[in-house]
Amino acid sequence: MAMSDVSEIDQQHQELVKMLNNLNDAVAKRESRESIYLIIDEVIGYTRFHFATEERLMVNSGYTDVEFHKDKHRQLMEDALHLKEKLADLGEEMFTDWFKHWPFTRVLAHIQYADQQFEDQLRRNGA
Ligand SMILES: [Fe+2]
Ligand SMILES: [Fe+2]
């Protein structure tokens, strides 16, 4: 059971990274504001779904760092919501510039470190 939870999380991470790459491409190709808006909405919706999955698995498995991890999720969610705000506030040109500094690597670092720790525990428990 624990192993399938790990692969579920991994699969969601792949999906999330794919969506973020789509967003990156769309901004780089200067696609219309409408289509970028749709991708951002997709990213926000999927991120919410993914964080809920992880947090549920954490609570169910008795993970000790759940509150700390939830707090990291809240911060990442703010970064994601910022995308939408900025696209609405800034013109397309300025958004493209602003987006270059969006903390994409923070998401990757979270997956590589914080999520990895949780997955390691799931694997240990599942053995
Ligand atoms: Fe994650
Ligand atoms: Fe996480």
Image (cartoon, grey):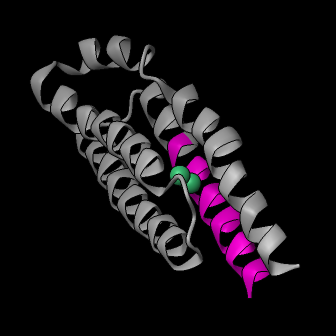
Residue 5 in the magenta stretch? The answer is yes
Question: In which quadrant of the rendered view does residue 5 lie?
Answer: bottom right
Q: How many marks?
A: 0
Q: Which quadrant is home to the N terminus? A: bottom right
Q: Residue 29, position in %: x, y?
A: 48, 28
Q: Residue at x 62, y 44 (%)?
A: 114
Front-most of residues 44 and 87: 44
* Left or right placement of residue 94 versus residue 55 in this view: left
Q: Residue at x 37, y 35 (%)?
A: 31
Residue 45 in the magenta stretch? The answer is no
Q: Residue at x 42, y 22 (%)?
A: 102
Relative height, residue 110 to residue 28 (above, below): below
Front-most of residues 20 and 3: 3
* Left or right placement of residue 100 versus residue 75 in this view: right
Characterize the magenta stretch by its predominant secondary structure: helix
Span colored in magenta = 1-20
Q: Residue at x 74, y 62 (%)?
A: 121
Relative height, residue 123 to residue 3 (above, below): above
Q: Residue 95, position in %: x, y?
A: 28, 19
Question: In which quadrant of the rendered view does residue 12 lie?
Answer: bottom right
Front-most of residues 38 and 46: 46
Q: Which quadrant is home to the C terminus? A: bottom right
Which residue, as the protein is rendered here, is positioned at the far left? Answer: 89
Which residue, as the protein is rendered here, is positioned at the far right? Answer: 127
* Left or right placement of residue 123 versus residue 48 in this view: right
* Left or right placement of residue 108 versus residue 35 in this view: right
